[in-house]
């Protein structure tokens, strides 16, 4: 059986003058459907490149990427936009909420553009924000904002949820809550969640951990017994 | 500067190149526009001043009514302040080209020999005239007339008046063309000849003129060249000297008058003497001739009389002759008849005789034979013969015997009857009694008769004879009757012979008588014929005489005619002489006390025109650019402010790194400085070259423009660029200072995003709920980012307002010429005249009544007066018709705002709108009017009317009279031409001038053309303004949109990550900027009204009102332009949006 996400020798090069730097150097991995996957590596290892390529924000130069059987790597810009629109939910480090929309509206904004969105208020309730639907981002705490961000990603009913350092701007406790939310989402909805982080502590809660360094995949671990978030410390 | 610092700066410039370029462009536009427009009028003045100075243009010009003499010139030279005096000649003449084109021409004498030539012509082609029949034509922008060429010959036209005396030459060949500083405008100088305006100026040699006095004197004033002309400073300097010249002018003019009048009088008295001599000589000759003629007439008269007497005599004679002839003829015929009658009588008698003789002869023969039968013997015969002789003795005997026999027979019958009836009577038949009585009477009568006869001698003789015969025995009863019958025949023979004899005598007598009568008649005839011949002769003699007389008469008539002709000739020659003398007398008496007309350059149409136009340019160019500049500066400074605020993180970092305040600030100051200094340099260099040149060149069609100079005006250059640079720098420093006040830590912290806010729209739930999120975002964003909102709307509004003002200025100019000269003033010709009598000129009146060409005329009092109110005063022109209907159809008095007619009647005083504004008066206020002579009167304003050019006050003469106590005599004739009349307006103008009743002509169409042309040039400036405003709008919109996008890169990246398509991203962002543009535009449209109003009211000249309203279409244009630029900017920006990397979304908020 084909895996849900399939990276096969994916390369991405950046040219600065004469020199060619490989941000992703023959990256290959597979992620199964419904897995909670953590991609981990130090700064500059190529995590973000992988995330960009996987999230359809950038195209790879070489290699094959399949998602749910679709060949992302051969997508045009236009198709990539549609891919982002319908198949990917993105959670940013800095939440990237539209400041001028209420929590509910931010979620609805995402739902607006996809085919069968989840009800926004319900999604927000699921992330525990049923009381704060009408608050503007500035009126919410960081964790709450990130939860809105997650709700926004979920409301699109995406195939995968991509999270870029979701805890990076949050304090420890809040970070944990967010991670719990992500894990619960994965567990409860069977949605594939991919978290990118430099924080190796988080790997313990993942089903699969992909280590990246210098643009290469150094190790792919399959964690048969993921630890609940509460048990993780950093 | 340290390397990294420098690198950092350069990188910042590179990264924010759009912003840098925008500041650069905005500063360049603002500075260039302001400096350029501000220096355009000084540049224009400078260029003209240089041109005038280089060619030594006159400062003062004097025209004398009677010319100026050498003494005058000497006097002028001695006036303090006068530098050079150049006397010369001028004449206006109608010239005709070979192609029969008439040119109303002004000829100036050309002086090239002197060292200090004033008004030096600059040859542009050909050469200067070498003899008196050559000329140089002045380059002026010709309109209408066909162009002149070198080699064309112009000849003085026959219907050219007054120039004959002034000019030696009658033809002028064009030898070249020259620029001549007094004339360079398409607007025409006025003249009293031809069409009333000058078509061509010619420079000719002094020898071409034929006067012993100067007609044109040019003067330069000391130190005037150093001043820039077309300025008040120059004008007042010249006016001082002009005043001095004026002060000697009346004395000089009086001397000149005396000289001219005494010369003329001397000539006149000579002419009078000559006239008198000629007159007396002619009188003598004519009276001799007349006497001769009269003698001849008298002779002819007597000849006539004689002849007519003779004729009468002749006629009488002829009558007599004819009468005689007639008598003669009738006598002759009478005579002939008589003779014929007599002849016939004779012949008749003869025939009778002959017949009787015949009868007698036959009777004789039968009787003779009977007698013979009786054979009578001698005795018997004798007795028979005795009986036979009885009828000769008694001719009645036979008849008596017959009667006797008859009576006896009757008696017998009566006796028988009587016997019968006597018996009957006796028987008782009484009825026969009467018959018996009658018969008895008859018996008596008969018996008496018988008795009578028987008793007569003849019977007795007869009875005796018979008895004798019987006695002879030869008796037979038939013999007596036979004897008697023969006796009767014998008697008859005797009678016949007697008759024949008598007849013969008669015949002879008749023949004698006839001969004598015929002789008599032929004598008479002869006499008659002689008389006739005599008459004939007399007649022919008469005819000869008559012919002679008639010939004499013809000769006399001819002589009479000759005399009459000679007399008429002499009379007319004398009358001409007398007329000439009286004309000369009149002319002398008409010579008015002359005066000098001292003109400065401002009186030249060309100079006045350029002066007015520069003023107009100045009016427009001084206000608008400031607003332009303000908008530009505002945008530049806000842009810098935003930049500094945007880079707070970097500032914080640098501050944390230990860079000094100044070092940090230095980067931004350097940024602002380099952008604004570069912009200023480009703006100044470009603006100072571009704008003045564009405006200058706009006047190419209107003027022969001299070379254009761009003197570097330091005040404008440093003023404008300094202001722009300082504005930007101050803004930058202010922003930096505010930012730097914060601690580095604060700076480096993510600045808390401004809280989302509910906008008013959300309260309207039904709408809000239906809005898309993107629209909600737009709505919230608009109000959330106040700075951005304000900055954008102000920027856009400013540009839109500039556009509205620009288009509005165009509106203000576009139709005022048409309104002024086609709607408000509807007369076609203005002709001033000197006195009221001039208008009564019959020729003029006839011309005005020619309804084919002229549809109406009126006369008004037109003069400059001063109107004042509460310390403000203004020169206005009066328009005072004799009565209230005098303006009907010539001037439309109406209110501008609503077009409502302003009633005009007695006691109504109407003032033009601009005047009312300057004087700050409204209906019901009173103003004081001061006439040229200082008379004052107070008037209450009862109406304010629309008017654009000049200021007028309208009232009737009665109204004026009532307030001023003096009359306002009409002195300006207004003529309205018929539509499609056969004669052109210039023909009519010519005719008007030719009457001599009017002293000048000006055509409304020309004024309109000139006004329109001038406005057209202003329009060029307006066009520049609109273009610049458009350019500014574009740059500002670009800049603002650019800033807006740079500030939202992260948000844009995020929504891209969320899967927004490019199109959705574009509309998400553009909707906002378009909305901002729309809001800015709407505000700008409103602001534009005020800006336009302000600019117009500041730009308006005293004597000129512009249209006050912006047309709807201009709003549409302004809005459309702004929106178009906005869309264009968005289009450009969509590429930038497209290029925004989604990676930006990963970055930390700044």
Image (tube, coloured by chain):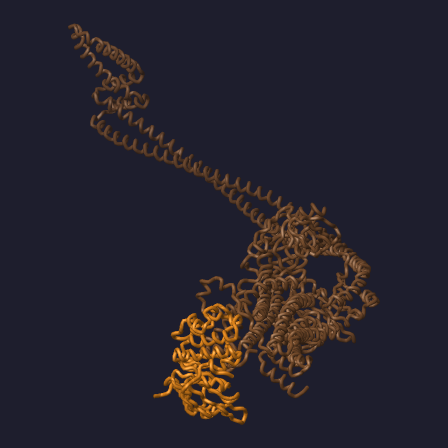
On the rendered structure, is A57 left or right of B167?
left
- Residue B148 visible at all: no
Q: In the rendered view, would you say B392 is above or below B937?
A: above
In the picture, which chain is orange? A
Residue nearest the observer in this picture, B156 or B47: B47
- Horizontal and vertical percent for residue A110? 44, 74
Q: In the rendered view, would you say A147 is above or below B551?
A: below
Q: Quadrant of the N terminus of chain B?
A: bottom right
Q: Quadrant of residue B117?
A: bottom right
Residue nearest the observer in this picture, B960 or B504: B960
In this figure, what is the number of numbered marks? 0
Q: In the rendered view, would you say B134 is above or below B558?
A: below
On the rendered structure, is B375 left or right of B528?
left
On the rendered structure, is B912 left or right of B1129?
right
- Residue B1062 visible at all: yes
- Horizontal and vertical percent for residue B139? 66, 73
Q: Quadrant of residue B962?
A: top right
Extreme left residue here? B427
Q: Quadrant of the C terminus of chain B?
A: bottom right
On the rendered structure, is B1123 left or right of B688?
left
- Horizontal and vertical percent for residue B476? 20, 21
In the picture, which chain is brown? B
- Horizontal and vertical percent for residue B4? 64, 87
Residue nearest the observer in this picture, B197 or B1126: B1126
Residue nearest the observer in this picture, B667 or B435: B667
């Amino acid at each position: 059986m084909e895996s849900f996400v399939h990276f096969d020798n994916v390369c991405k090069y950046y040219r600065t003058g004469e020199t060619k730097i490989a941000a992703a150097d023959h990256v290959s991995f597979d992620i199964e459907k419904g897995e909670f996957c953590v991609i981990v590596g130090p700064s500059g290892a190529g995590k973000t490149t992988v995330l960009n390529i996987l999230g359809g924000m950038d195209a790879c130069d070489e290699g094959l990427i399949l998602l749910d059987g679709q060949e992302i790597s051969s997508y045009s810009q236009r198709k990539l936009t549609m891919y982002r629109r319908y198949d990917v939910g993105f959670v940013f480090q800095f939440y990237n909420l539209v400041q001028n929309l209420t929590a509910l509206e931010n979620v609805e904004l995402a739902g607006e553009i996809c085919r069968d969105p989840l009800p926004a208020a319900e999604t927000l309730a699921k992330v525990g924000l049923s009381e704060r639907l009408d608050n503007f981002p500035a009126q919410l705490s960081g964790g709450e904002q990130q939860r809105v961000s997650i709700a926004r990603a979920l409301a699109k009913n995406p195939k995968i949820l991509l999270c870029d350092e979701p805890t990076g701007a949050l304090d420890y406790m809040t970070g944990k809550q967010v991670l719990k939310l992500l894990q619960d989402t994965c567990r409860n909805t069977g949605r594939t969640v991919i978290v990118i982080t430099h924080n190796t502590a988080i790997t313990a809660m993942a089903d699969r951990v992909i280590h990246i360094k210098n643009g290469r995949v150094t190790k792919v671990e399959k964690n048969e017994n993921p630890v609940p978030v509460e048990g993780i410390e950093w | 500067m340290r390397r990294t610092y420098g690198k950092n700066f350069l990188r910042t410039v590179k990264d924010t190149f759009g912003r840098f370029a925008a500041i650069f462009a905005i500063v360049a536009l603002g500075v260039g526009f302001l400096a350029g427009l501000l220096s355009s009028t000084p540049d224009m003045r400078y260029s003209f001043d240089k041109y005038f100075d280089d060619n030594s243009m006159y400062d003062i010009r004097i025209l004398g009514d009677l010319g100026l003499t050498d003494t005058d010139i000497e006097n002028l030279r001695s006036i303090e302040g006068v530098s050079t005096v150049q006397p010369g000649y001028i004449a206006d003449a109608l010239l005709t080209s070979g192609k029969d084109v008439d040119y109303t021409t002004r000829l100036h004498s050309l002086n090239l020999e002197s060292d200090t030539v004033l008004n030096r012509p600059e040859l542009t082609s050909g050469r200067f005239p070498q003899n008196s029949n050559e000329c140089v034509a002045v380059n002026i922008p010709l309109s209408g007339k066909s162009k002149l060429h070198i080699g064309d010959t112009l000849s003085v036209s026959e219907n050219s008046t007054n120039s004959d005396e002034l000019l030696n030459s009658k033809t002028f060949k064009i030898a070249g063309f020259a620029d001549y500083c007094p004339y360079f405008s398409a607007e025409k100088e006025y003249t009293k000849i031809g069409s009333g305006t000058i078509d061509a100026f010619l420079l000719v040699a002094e020898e071409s003129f034929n006067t012993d006095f100067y007609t044109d004197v040019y003067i330069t004033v000391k130190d005037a060249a150093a001043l820039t002309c077309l300025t008040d400073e120059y004008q007042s300097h010249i006016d001082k000297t002009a005043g001095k010249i004026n002060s000697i002018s009346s004395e000089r003019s009086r001397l000149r008058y005396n000289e001219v009048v005494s010369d003329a009088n001397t000539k006149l008295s000579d002419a009078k003497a000559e006239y008198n001599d000629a007159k007396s000589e002619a009188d003598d000759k004519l009276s001799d001739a007349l006497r001769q003629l009269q003698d001849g007439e008298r002779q002819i008269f007597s000849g006539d009389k004689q002849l007519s007497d003779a004729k009468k005599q002749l006629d009488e004679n002829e009558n007599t002759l004819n009468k005689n002839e007639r008598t003669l003829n009738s006598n002759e015929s009478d005579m002939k008849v008589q003779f014929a009658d007599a002849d016939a009588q004779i012949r008749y008698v003869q025939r009778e005789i002959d017949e009787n003789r015949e009868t007698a002869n036959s009777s004789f023969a039968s009787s003779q034979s009977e007698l013979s039968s009786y054979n009578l013997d001698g005795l018997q015969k004798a007795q028979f013969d005795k009986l036979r002789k009885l009828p000769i003795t008694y001719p009645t005997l036979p008849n008596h015997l017959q009667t006797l026999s008859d009576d006896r027979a009757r008696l017998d019958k009566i006796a028988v009857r009587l016997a019968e009836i006597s018996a009957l009577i006796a028987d008782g038949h009484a009825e026969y009694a009467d018959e018996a009585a009658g018969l008895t009477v008859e018996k008596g009568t008969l018996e008496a008769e018988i008795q009578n006869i028987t008793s007569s001698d003849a019977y007795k003789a007869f009875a005796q004879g018979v008895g004798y015969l019987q006695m002879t025995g030869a008796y037979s009863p038939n013999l007596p009757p036979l004897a008697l019958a023969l006796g009767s025949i014998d008697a008859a023979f005797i009678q016949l012979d007697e008759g024949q004899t008598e007849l013969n005598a008669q015949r002879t007598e008749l023949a004698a008588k006839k001969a004598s009568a015929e002789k008599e008649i032929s004598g008479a005839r002869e006499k008659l014929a002689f008389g006739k011949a005599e008459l004939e002769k007399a007649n022919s003699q008469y005819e000869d005489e008559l012919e002679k007389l008639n010939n004499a008469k013809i000769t006399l008539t001819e002589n009479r005619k000759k005399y009459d002709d000679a007399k008429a000739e002499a009379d007319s020659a004398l009358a001409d002489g007398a007329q000439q003398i009286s004309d000369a007398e009149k002319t002398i008496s008409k010579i008015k006390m002359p005066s000098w007309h001292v003109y400065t350059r401002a009186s030249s149409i060309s100079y006045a025109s350029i002066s007015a136009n520069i003023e107009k340019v100045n009016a427009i160019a001084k206000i608008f650019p400031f607003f332009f500049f303000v908008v530009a500066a505002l945008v530049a400074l806000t842009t810098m402010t935003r930049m500094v605020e945007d880079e707070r993180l970097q500032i914080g970092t640098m501050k944390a790194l230990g860079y000094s305040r100044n070092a940090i600030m230095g980067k931004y100051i350097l940024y602002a400085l380099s952008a604004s200094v570069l912009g200023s340099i480009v703006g100044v260099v470009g603006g100072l070259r571009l704008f003045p040149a564009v405006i200058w060149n706009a006047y190419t069609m209107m003027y022969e423009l001299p070379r254009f100079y761009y003197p570097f005006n330091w005040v404008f250059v440093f003023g404008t660029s300094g202001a722009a640079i300082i504005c930007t720098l101050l803004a930058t420093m202010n922003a930096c200072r505010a930012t730097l006040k914060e601690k580095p830590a604060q700076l480096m912290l993510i600045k808390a995003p401004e809280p989302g806010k509910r906008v008013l729209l959300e309260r309207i739930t039904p709408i809000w709920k239906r809005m898309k999120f993107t629209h909600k975002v737009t709505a919230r964003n608009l109000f959330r980012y106040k700075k951005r909102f304000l900055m954008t709307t102000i920027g856009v509004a400013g540009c839109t307002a500039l556009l509205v003002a620009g288009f509005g200025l165009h509106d203000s100019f576009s139709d005022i010429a048409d309104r002024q000269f086609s709607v408000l003033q509807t007369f076609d010709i203005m002709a001033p005249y000197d006195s009221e009598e001039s208008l009564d000129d019959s020729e003029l009146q006839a011309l005005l009544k020619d309804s084919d060409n002229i549809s109406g005329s009126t006369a008004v009092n037109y003069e400059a007066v001063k109107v004042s109110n509460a310390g403000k005063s203004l020169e206005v022109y009066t328009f005072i018709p004799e009565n209230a209907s005098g303006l009907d159809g010539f001037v439309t008095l109406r209110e501008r705002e609503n077009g409502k007619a302003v009633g005009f009647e007695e006691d109504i005083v109407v003032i033009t709108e601009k005047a009312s504004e300057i004087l700050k008066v409204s209906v019901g206020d009173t103003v004081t009017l001061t006439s040229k002579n200082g008379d004052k009167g107070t008037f209450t304003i009862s109406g304010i009317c629309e008017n654009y050019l000049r200021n007028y006050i309208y009232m009737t003469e009665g109204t004026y009279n009532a307030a001023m106590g003096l009359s306002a005599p009409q002195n300006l004739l207004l003529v309205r031409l018929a539509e499609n009349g056969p004669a052109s307006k210039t023909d009519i103008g010519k005719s008007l001038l030719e009457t001599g009743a009017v002293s000048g002509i000006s055509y409304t169409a020309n004024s309109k053309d000139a006004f329109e042309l001038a406005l057209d040039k202003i329009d060029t400036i307006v066009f520049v303004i609109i273009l610049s405003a458009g350019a500014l709008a574009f740059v500002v919109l670009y800049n603002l949109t650019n800033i807006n996008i740079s500030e939202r890169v992260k948000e844009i990246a995020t929504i891209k990550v969320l899967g927004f398509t490019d199109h959705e991203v574009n509309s998400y962002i553009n909707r906002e900027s378009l909305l901002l543009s729309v809001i800015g535009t709407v505000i700008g449209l409103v602001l534009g009204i005020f800006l336009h109003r302000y600019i117009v009211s500041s730009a308006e000249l005293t004597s000129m009102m512009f249209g006050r309203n912006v047309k709807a279409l201009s709003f549409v244009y302004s809005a459309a332009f702004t929106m178009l630029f906005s869309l264009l900017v968005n289009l450009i920006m969509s590429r930038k949006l497209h290029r925004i990397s989604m990676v930006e979304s990963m970055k930390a908020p700044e």
